[in-house]
Amino acid sequence: MGARILVVEDERSIRSFIITNLKRNGFEVLEAERGHEALRLVKLEKPDLVLLDIKLPDLDGFQICKEISSSYPEISVIMLTALGQDLDKVKGLELGADDYIIKPFNPMVLIARIKAILRRTNKKIQKEVCTGPFRVDLEAQSIYKNDVLLEFTPREFCLMKVFINNINKALSRDEILNLVWGEDFIGDPKTVDVHIRRLREKIEDNPSKPQYIETLWGRGYLWRKGD
């Protein structure tokens, strides 16, 4: 599987057109039609590159680009815009975008631009993430501790991936809830605490004195990078 691309575009026909061409060229594709969903996927999935429309129903592309650039500088951004004014191009580049493409565009040009950025930034497709004694196989969706396979439910794996992708970053309960359960979740927010307690029982040497998932009282949780 090729690099992972997140397509952020609210017009379904354009989004489908882009996705079809990306898949034909061997890329793995994620998609979002709103800004908040795009940021959720960036935090959860850590794509290699984001194709980002400027005009979205909730957040605009400039806000999203700024957030990605400041929090995840390793993720490349190409802005897709129907706006042809130089000020918009300059603003996008100043906020951290790697390139911009004016709609409508030739799909061959888009693919070429993506490949050029991935080559220039020397992106390597990440199949595993390692931290401390843990090794996360992103393709097989498996997690090992000291090379021993751990048993996780799909929800627990998703929660673990959120922490692994946000090492040493404080995450509030609401952020975790949105990332793992989705913004439309209706239920008790304390389900986060229940799942984290179960997760600690599986990954910590002493769950009552956690070494990895730290509680930030009144704020949320944080994954401490292991030695």
Image: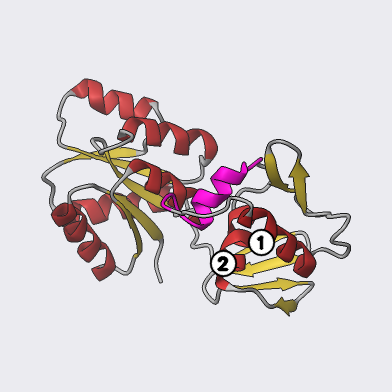
Numbered badge on residue 195: 1
Give the alpha-carbon distance from disc 1 to disc 2, as whole Å: 8 Å
User: Mark 2 — residue?
Assistant: 155
Quadrant into which the C terminus falls = bottom right
The answer to whether marks 1 and 2 mark residues whose Cβ atoms lie closer than 8 Å is: yes
Q: Could you tell me residue 90's position as x and y percent?
A: 29, 24
- What residue is drawn where x is 14% and y is 29%? 84
Residue furthest to the top: 87
- Which of 62 and 57 lies nearest the eye of the viewer? 57
**Mark with earlier residue (1, 2):** 2
Chain part drawn in magenta: 170-184
The quadrant of the rendering that contains the N terminus is bottom left
Residue 114 point in image, percent of width and height: 31, 52
Query: How many labels were placed on the picture?
Result: 2
Whether 88 is among the magenta residues is no
Q: Is residue 89 above or below residue 165?
A: above
